[in-house]
Amino acid sequence: MTNSRFYFIFTIFASIFVAAHLFVYWSMTRTLVVPEIKILIGTVLVFFVSLMLLSFWSQGTGHFHLPKYLKYMGYVWMGVYFIFFSMAVLFEAVRVLFKVPVQSSWILVASCAMVALALVKGFQFPAVKRKLISSEKVPASFHGKKIVQLSDLHLGHLFLDDVFVTKLVEQVNALEPDFVMITGDLVENSFERVKPLLAILSGINAKLGKYYVTGNHEYYYGGAIWEKEMARLGWRVLHNDFETLSLGGGRVNVAGLPDISSRGFDPHQAFNPQLLFSRLPPADFTILLSHQPRSLEHIPVHMVDLFLAGHTHGGQIFPFHLLVKTREPFLNGLYKEKSRFIHVNPGTGFWGPPMRLGSSSEISLLELSNPGVALAGLGDSS
């Protein structure tokens, strides 16, 4: 980015950012009568506006670097302010539309309560969520096989460190998965910082295979270097590529595409579903990994039986869900569209503020099931 372009973007961003904070200040102090509280709120807002603008300036120009603790405070403020702004908009809309005499103290108390809840949920370790993929196309030999899907780990970001990864490896291995599949946004820092964390992550065990596709954030931190490192550590990297597994007469394709935005970073790394599907052999059941749910727009329905994605974080902080849904066709969880299943992991880690509101971090445990085999098993047991 050229200096002139950055200065232009910074000016626009700073103007909007300051105006939005002024709106929050006005809304939260409009009916307050204690001047000391107004001064306190104003001081806090000025401090964090300055911190965020300094952070943006330092990243864009490289003239200086903020201490890590200030960066952490800035990330937390991103979430805090988003909730404050959303609550202010909500209460002011109620006041104007329904003529309710909304008090500034209501907005302040409600916002603080939502922030506290979001922080509590954000610091919770991801829970295991079990889901059944029941299809007659699942080969009998793959009935009962378990897939652990991880997504949006953002390793190297805030406290997503060696302690987090070590606990994650223990949790995943305790599930005794047949497959482990990572659907992108694995990293959120430099190669030197994240490389040791990937070494710990390689301690994950899977009976039939460990698979990985890139997300958009890998391309912010070096692109292809992450695929090379994951391959070196024993993961099967699916870059417009696939692997066919044969077991007891059943055949399952596990295929993957790099992030749909990859073509904008490196033409040689480009998302290319046409190339993938021109080479994909026939199989009983096909699983496709791709980071963003909107990748499905380029995938013929009949080519895929189970599509795994991430990227959305389930909205992470409500009401950001509403913005995500304008861009992504699926937000969070398991969907059935015609003959195929779609599963969107809401993020095993987080991006930006360590906060969650209306969403939860997740280790997805998907069990493949053939209803005929399951029914036969029930009959045998009776």
Image (cartoon, rainbow, N blue to C red):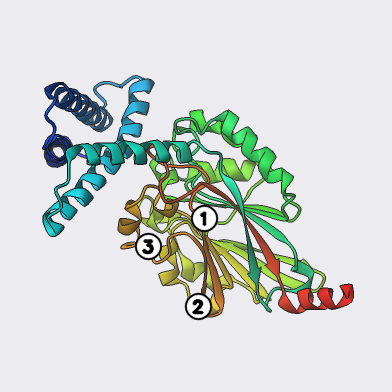
Residue shown at the point (79%, 70%) measured from the top left: 141
In the displayed structure, would residue 184 be above or below residue 125? below
Which residue matches tag 1?
A: 345
Q: Quadrant of residue 368?
A: bottom right
Callout 3: 10 Å neighbours few (<14), some, many (20+)? some
Residue 42, visible in the rendered structure: yes
Q: Name which of mark 3 and mark 1 comes first in the sequence.
A: 3
x and y percent of residue 251 in the render?
A: 72, 71
| For residue 344, above or below residue 165 | below
Distance of label 3 from label 2 (alpha carbons): 17 Å
Image position, residue 86 (x, y; %): 25, 47
> Residue drawn at (30%, 57%), measured in percent from left and top?
323
Secondary structure under the numbered disc 1 in the rendered image: loop
Mark 1 belongs to which amino acid?
Asn
The residue at the point 59 percent across, 35 percent down is 165
**Residue flagged by tag 2: what amino acid is it?**
Val
Identify the residue position indicated by label 2 in the image: 301
Q: Seen in the image, is 72 located left or right of residue 289?
A: left
* Residue 325 relative to residue 280: left or right: left
**Is disc 3 placed on a helix, strand or loop?**
loop
In the displayed structure, would residue 197 be above or below residue 82? above
Q: Earlier in the sequence, mark 1 or mark 2?
A: 2
Q: Is residue 238 left or right of residue 115?
A: right
Quickly name the residue at label 3. Answer: 328
